[in-house]
Image (spheres, rainbow, N blue to C red):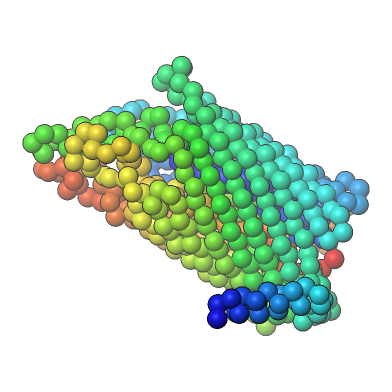
Amino acid sequence: MAATSRSAFRLAVGAALFCHAVVRAGVLPEDRADALYHSYEGGGVEITGPSLMVLKNVGQNASVNGNYYVDSISSASIDVITSGASPYSEKRTEVTGGLDYMHGNSIMSLSYTNSSEDDYKANTAGFGISMDMFGNMTTVSMGYSRGWDTVLNNLDSSFSQDVDRQNYKLGLTQVITKDMLLELDYEGITDEGFLNNPYRSVRYLDPGGTSYSYQAEVYPNTRTSSAVAIRSLYYLPYRAAVSGEYRFFTDTWGIDAHTVKLAYAHPLKGGWLLEGNYRYYTQNSADFYNDLFPYKDAQNFLARDKELSTFSSNSIEVKVSYDFLENGWHSIDRGTVTLAWDHILFDYDDFRDLRFVAPIPGEEPLYSLSADVVQLFVSVWF
Amino acid sequence: MCLRTCCLLLLTLSLMGCSSIEPWVKPYERAHLADPIMNFDRDPVSGAYVTHVYQAREAARGAEGGHGGGCGCN
């Protein structure tokens, strides 16, 4: 898996922690347990595994949470195939523990995550606080997390490099009307250390221009990014909800990205809930990205990671939930089972498919992939 | 002109700080907001997983939401 993918995973962990930690200021999260099975299949990559989470109140003012997550990866991606490497399998395990403490209209949260795989170790510690104010019309939240990663290389046992990460989050949720909520989000992230992938190469034209060769990619050792998002949720008169979201992202590598998402939730009789959403994403490439460099060592930083290229993605999600314990059972208040399916299309504008040979390098067809993501999970409140 | 505008803005903010803001949606009007479908992050485990799926394949990261709040239903 690409280093950027790995680092992104750590960031996803941070996001998850904050999700758990500050559900609603002034109200501790409900006692809840979730067991989820996830499956991703696309572009020659299959990733499956469980995610188990428990949230439990301890006394009147505290709540603890834990999450166990596994990615079992089987990869024959275009990067693996075109580099001549053999398809590989690996497993990543992540464990998170957290504590929420309520004081008045505020909730403070602490969390710690450890993620481990053969060639990447990560530890993340996070702190967050959220406060209700103005008659509980406004919720303000802040968060900070710090991560310490170690990048290893399965082909070189002496290779070991560090990455330090810091996340800063600010959020505001506002009641607009009795039917409408508005949310504003900011997140700044800084990374410092070995940010590229020890296995990945870039390609460059050989003298004569009729063939190409490879050299190792070289990334800057710092990256700072900012993302701002606005999202709104609206209650429709016939008991349904519609939501919209826009996010802008920019970083010091020259990447700007835009995300738009529209969603709809429709409860049905008998405890059923139908949901659907459409998501569009687009980004331009990093300053130092090139599908084909003109010659060896063409510039000081070199990347040919498709996640840093210019591309767009379109996705749809369909989700069905059934409340199988609407009236509770023994100590369980409620239980739901949910099946979700996402279909994602990625279209790359300057990343070429090297499984095809072109007479002149740089004229191979552009790469695209489609992916299917399935989630099946059971949630119980107790 | 700019200084005058800034002074006026500061004065206005100071006065706002002295007065309490009346909630324009009363607690008894929040039945719709308290409905489970009015939650930005109804399924946190699923939400965290989907965030991971996209972060692993896109350069953008952060501000995915999920900090909750809004209803004030305590």
Residue A335 image point, x, y percent: 76, 56
The residue most toward the right is A59
Residue placed at 52% from the left, 57% from the top?
A227
Picture mark count:
0
Along the horizontal axis of the image, is B23 left or right of A317? right
Q: Could one spot residue A19 in this view of the protein?
A: yes
The residue most toward the top is A158
Asked if residue A327 is positioned above or below residue A97 in the image, the reply reads: below
Foreground: A110 or A144?
A144
Residue A129 image point, x, y percent: 74, 53
Asked if residue B71 is positioned above or below residue B28 in the image, the reply reads: above
Residue A193 image point, x, y percent: 49, 34
Residue placed at 71% from the left, 77% from the top?
B11
Foreground: A268 or A145?
A145
Q: Could one spot residue A313 in this view of the protein?
A: no
- Could you tell me which quadrant the N terminus of chain A lies in? top left
Along the horizontal axis of the image, is A116 left or right of A54? left
Quarter residue A179 falls in: bottom right
Asked if residue A167 is positioned above or below residue A279 in the image, the reply reads: above
Quarter residue A326 falls in: bottom right
Residue placed at 29% from the left, 48% from the top?
A351
Residue B24 image point, x, y percent: 77, 81
Quarter residue A219 falls in: top left
Along the horizontal axis of the image, is B36 left or right of A345? right
Residue placed at 79% from the left, 67% from the top?
A133
Along the horizontal axis of the image, is A184 left or right of A76? right
